[in-house]
Image (cartoon, grey):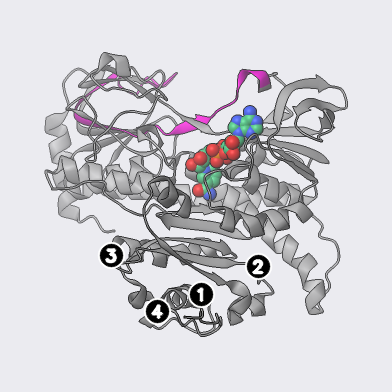
Amino acid sequence: MIVGDGLVVGNSIYLKVFLMSDASVEKSELVVVGGGPGGYPAAFDAADRGMNVTLVNDEKIPGGVCLHRGCIPSKALLHVAKLIDETHESVEWGVEFGAPKIDLDQLRTWKGSVVEKLTGGIAELCRARGVKLIQARGSFLDSTTLKLDATGNSEIPAQLKFQHAIVATGSSPVVPPIFSIGDPRVIDSTGALNLEDVPERLLVVGGGYIGLEMGFVYASLGSAVTVVEMTSGLLPGADRDLVRPLRKRLDDKFQAIHLNAKVQSLTAKKNGIEAEIEGEGVEPKQTFDRVLIAVGRRPNSQNLGLENTRVQLDERGFIKVNSRMQTDDPSIMAIGDIAGEPMLAHKATREAKVAVESLAGEPAAFDNQAIPAVVFTDPELAWCGLTETEAKKSKREIAVSRFPWAASGRAQTLGRTEGLTKLIFDPKTERVLGMGIVGPGAGELIGEAVVAVETAAVARDLAESIHAHPTLSETIMESAEGFLGHATHVYRPKRAK
Ligand code: NAD
């Protein structure tokens, strides 16, 4: 393992000295509360730097929502959904498969095994690094004491004294009271991932990340999916150029997509959940076998005892932090979903590194220009850096170059020409400010854009770097070429002088 024997031994000696004689109170130099993609990387980084670290997590194995009930299980299911879809599409390529036989038990087992492998790995890394893992709910009694609530486990100390704390307690799905009707057929993202059945008729309330990703999975498995979205478009925060090709595909895949529409009430009936839906041209009463509520998440800042500390919350319940992830309480830091939007695992992980560097007295700051966002539907959507909408809002002058995937050899070989790669430049300096991609694999491609934005690359850097042929990454190169006026595979007649 990466941790040397000396360090582990050193840590355990330190621990012995550090522990108090009162068995109900333990001491730790650093306590990390919450073991998700913010919390466990923070604990690991701090332990690697020789700190005495305790990770308090209410689940036995760290991993958080992302590993247990979010990113990982949903991506496992989305992979299966894509496979099923491809068996339909292949008819066009001269290969026909029979209708898929779906064994839900086996599918659940496979999804579970993926999660288990990853969470098991994290538990092992905790042990190897000498991070002390305590399974309990933590809440602050004051700025240096955490109360530990481990119902029924007398071996867990009642309190933990700390020098520094990092709060990384994440977020939970929002379920507005009108949808809380106490019927198991009304589910949130966790319920959807449990995959209890494949409902014949599924209503998805909310056309955001979760609504579309889970709606996608269930539609591929055979559900008739209806999406009700209250704004005028799917994925409200995303660039419309990127949403358009996805929308086109979803129009075929989903039973219905109702925009500018609202679910006014849900009523449990014997034959399903009756939804009263308000929206132009929408059948006002419809019955569904299950209803997925995916209308956003809220930070888990309740019941943490933060009122006993100097930590301040904003009006939405996020902990206020500065760019060094410090809160208003000098001994408490916060990272991840609880520290503000975007609520994305990779943002949490970066903040973890910044927090630990700050703790170590290094000149760290969360000053990232590009936080990639990926929607794992098919096609995938991915973007980072400045968007056209943001530029318009801030009246910033930009130049936009679009490269349609119909001109990409690789996209043609995949039979997926609906994609688009869109680059945003500063017209004067030619610096890459942002990128948006829609198409299969967009989530993998966006990595190049993140590096380009963060390293202040200019159009020529992308255009003159050799991109392997035939790959979808060439669309980034050609989009940059387009900005410079000469994309090989797209001819644009010169304007008359
Ligand atoms: P979201 O904010 O992405 O989407 C919620 C949608 O619901 C919005 O479009 C909103 O306009 C709509 N809405 C809100 N109230 C409504 C109502 N009463 N009726 C109809 N529509 C309504 O939220 P989410 O999909 O629940 O996901 C939560 C968060 O989880 C995301 O913001 C994201 O940060 C994270 N997430 C990320 C990924 C990913 O990275 N691929 C996947 C899933 C979740």
Q: Is mark 4 within 8 Å of ligand 1?
A: no
Q: Which residue is mark 4?
A: 463
Distance of mark 2 from mark 1, alpha carbons? 13 Å
Q: What separation in Å lies between label 4 and label 1 (alpha carbons)?
A: 10 Å
Mark 1 Cα shell of 10 Å, populated few (<14), some (14-19), many (≥20): many
From where the camera sits, is residue 70 visible? no
Q: CA distance from mark 2 to mark 3?
A: 30 Å
Q: Earlier in the sequence, mark 2 or mark 1?
A: 2
Q: Position of residue 101 (x, y in %)?
A: 82, 57
Label 3 near label 1: C-beta < 8 Å? no
Q: Which residue is mark 3?
A: 455
Residue at numbered disc 1: 475
Mark 1 to mark 3 CA distance (whole Å): 20 Å
Foreground tag (3 vs 4): 4
The reply to whether residue 298 is in sight is: yes
Work out whether 188 lies above or below 311. Answer: below
Please report the residue visible at 64 percent of the width from the left and 56 percent of the height from the top. 244
Answer yes or no: do the residues labelled 4 and 1 have beta carbons within 8 Å?
no
The answer to if 33 sits in the magenta stretch is no
Marks 2/3 in contact by CB < 8 Å: the verdict is: no
Look at the image and give the residue range highlighted in magenta. 149-178
Q: Amino acid at mark 3?
A: Thr
Q: Secondary structure at mark 1?
A: helix
Q: Secondary structure at mark 3?
A: loop
Q: Which residue is mark 2?
A: 418
The residue shown at (34%, 50%) is: 125
Amino acid type for the residue under numbered disc 1: Thr
Work out which quarter of the rendered image holds the N terminus and state it.
Answer: bottom left
